[in-house]
Image (cartoon, rainbow, N blue to C red):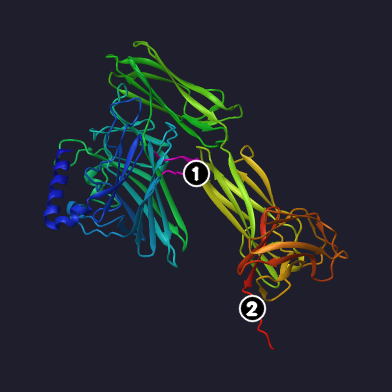
Amino acid sequence: MIMKYIFKKTLFFLLILMCTFPVVAGEKSDTLTNEFIKIIVNKGPQDQGRFSIETTNGDPLSLSDDNQLLIYGRPTPWTSYTTIKIDGKNYIFGGPSKKTQRRTGKLTTFGEVVSQEKNAESLSTVVKFDKISVTQTLQFFRSPTTRVKDAVLISYDIQNLDSTKHDIGLRLMLDTKLGSNDGAPFRIGESEITSELELDKERLADYWMTFDSLSTPNIIAQGTLKLGDLQIYPPDKLLLSNWGTLVDNPWEIDYKEGRSFIRTGENEKDTALGLYWNPQSVEPSKNLSIKTLYGLGEITLAPGELSLGLTAPKEIPINSTEEHLIMAYIFNSGGFDAHQSQLEFDLPKGLSITQGKLNTTHSILKTGETLQIPIKVKLNDAIEPGLFNIGFRAQSTTLESNSIERNILFSAPPKLSYKISTKLIKTSPVENYYLTTLTLSNYSHLPIKRIAASLRLPKQLALVSLEEKIKKVPLLESNKQEKLTWLIKTPVESLPTQSIRVLIKSNSNKVLISKLKQHLPTQRLSLSESKESIEKGDYFYISINQKQADPLNLENLEIHLDKKLRFIRYSVNPEITNTPNVTYKNSVISIDNLKSKTLPFQNSLLKLHFKALEKGQSNIILKINNKQSLEKEITIKEKTNVKSTN
């Protein structure tokens, strides 16, 4: 670690001497901070897009993890980087890096940084590799273990902008650090890993943890590899090695299982990990999404001769269909070997074990040794919302027994909010086109997955060519919105009086099944004026015309005027229209219960008589059920002076 620090400092000052002030000006970072952690992204131009993670206040119940490193990155991030493998060739994500090239002594290919943006919720960097665009996004995330935003969602959205398919893979290399400790063991499932090891997907647990001590941990870090509810899926392999080995090789290394985490020429451990997603074929105009989660972890602790730790999700929605990992840790701090240790989980009735055992016996647990026991559970039919306890007990024939409990909340499913609207966007002599928009909102703190909305149309309506009846949203994250749209057409002469319907389903029937109705805005009416040219002081009328033969029944119709017009009176044709209720107040003409008979052709239903008061543009707006349907613009000219012809 000392040599690594000296190398970084020496290289930093050499670059200042070689490149003078422009590089110094570039050695800045974008940061995003909350009360738990901080995200730092290098602004470049050197090493642009590389990131690190630190704590701010960390765990509120611990003072020892304040302002500590989780990923190395001081003064600016550069030691961790991401490799994009495209058709067998390795590219480094982000801006060029003299430090990496000097360190490795190899010619490295970088991409072209297109943009780097910061907003209130995330930091994103877009890099292009010819016709492949990769967006790295880092954002705070509510950890399932702690229920607070003390983790970082690291995601890559890879787009194939080419006209041919490409094989694309990704390696994320993290220069992990636990405060001042760069050699804390990685804990995955039953394994405490202290030397180089490669694990394929089948051997990976849902998450890994690292901490220096179970009895009095200074800082606890956790990397989540699988969280199906949030579409986080495990990499194809995880590689733990020393930093030098991983930084010097952008993809494959000369793997040696059991090799020390101490780099050649140093005397302290310097750990790092690589997450590998193997290349897969990405078709033209398609995307590949890769996500992982890293931040603080939480272990409920019970000190004793047999020190215990228990970690599990703090909250599970009762409609979850995923398996969930529970980890128990036992550390023999009693000074003597523990013999015939009886270890037992105690689960609430809503959980069933799917992997592992509730009861195990360990013949000898040596003093100073840590034992890790994973089990997987799934919700069963007995699940009910509420706060429950998960328990774990340990007893042996030589040391004092100990037990521990951890709360778990079985929460009601998140609620999906929604609204629907339809508007006319295009007319033609033959067809009208409407856009129906369904806005879905998730105001809960939990994600909603697998949303499907199906449009149900009456016979007279049809979707335009290539428009899909069913629209899907795979995942709607907390406090997010998603809009789904359908383009609909209908013949002008047969506008339907029925409603369109949308059926929404999400997760399961427990979450939501709703039918939404939306009437199309009426286009069975038109407006026309009685005179082609209207001058100030003229009397004229606006005719409300029925465009189609079908009978019409309007209960709430309004005509909104401006101050350029004065309403005088109205008139109807009694042969085709009843006498409606008409009132006038505050420049609004209200017309209730306007009914028409079947007409063989377009005809006037109602005439509204006005006087033009002022010159200029005057807008007449017709609303039905308080929604704008038609608008008529009238130009009022100055009165023409008529000269005498004596």
Q: In terms of secondary structure, what is the magenta stretch mainly?
A: loop
Q: Amino acid at mark 1?
A: Glu
Q: Position of residue 600 (x, y in %)?
A: 84, 70
* Left or right of residue 487, residue 480 in this image: left
Residue that label 1 marks: 477
- Relative to the observer, which residue lies in front, 335 or 603? 603
Q: Amino acid at mark 2?
A: Thr
**CA distance for labels 2 and 1:** 64 Å
Range covered by the magenta-colored residues = 224-234
At mark 1, the secondary structure is: loop
- Relative to the observer, which residue lies in front, 542 or 111? 542
The mark nearer the N terminus, 2 or 1, is: 1
* Left or right of residue 13, residue 124 in this image: right
Q: Indicate the quadrant containing the N terminus: top left, top right, bottom left or bottom right.
A: top left
Q: Position of residue 188 (x, y in %)?
A: 36, 34
Taking the spot 66% from the left edge, 42% from the top edge, the residue there is 513
Residue 541 visible from this viewpoint: yes
* Left or right of residue 68, residue 294 in this image: right
Q: Indicate the quadrant containing the C terminus: top left, top right, bottom left or bottom right.
A: bottom right
Residue that label 2 marks: 640
Q: Position of residue 270 (x, y in %)?
A: 22, 39
Q: Position of residue 197 (x, y in %)?
A: 30, 39
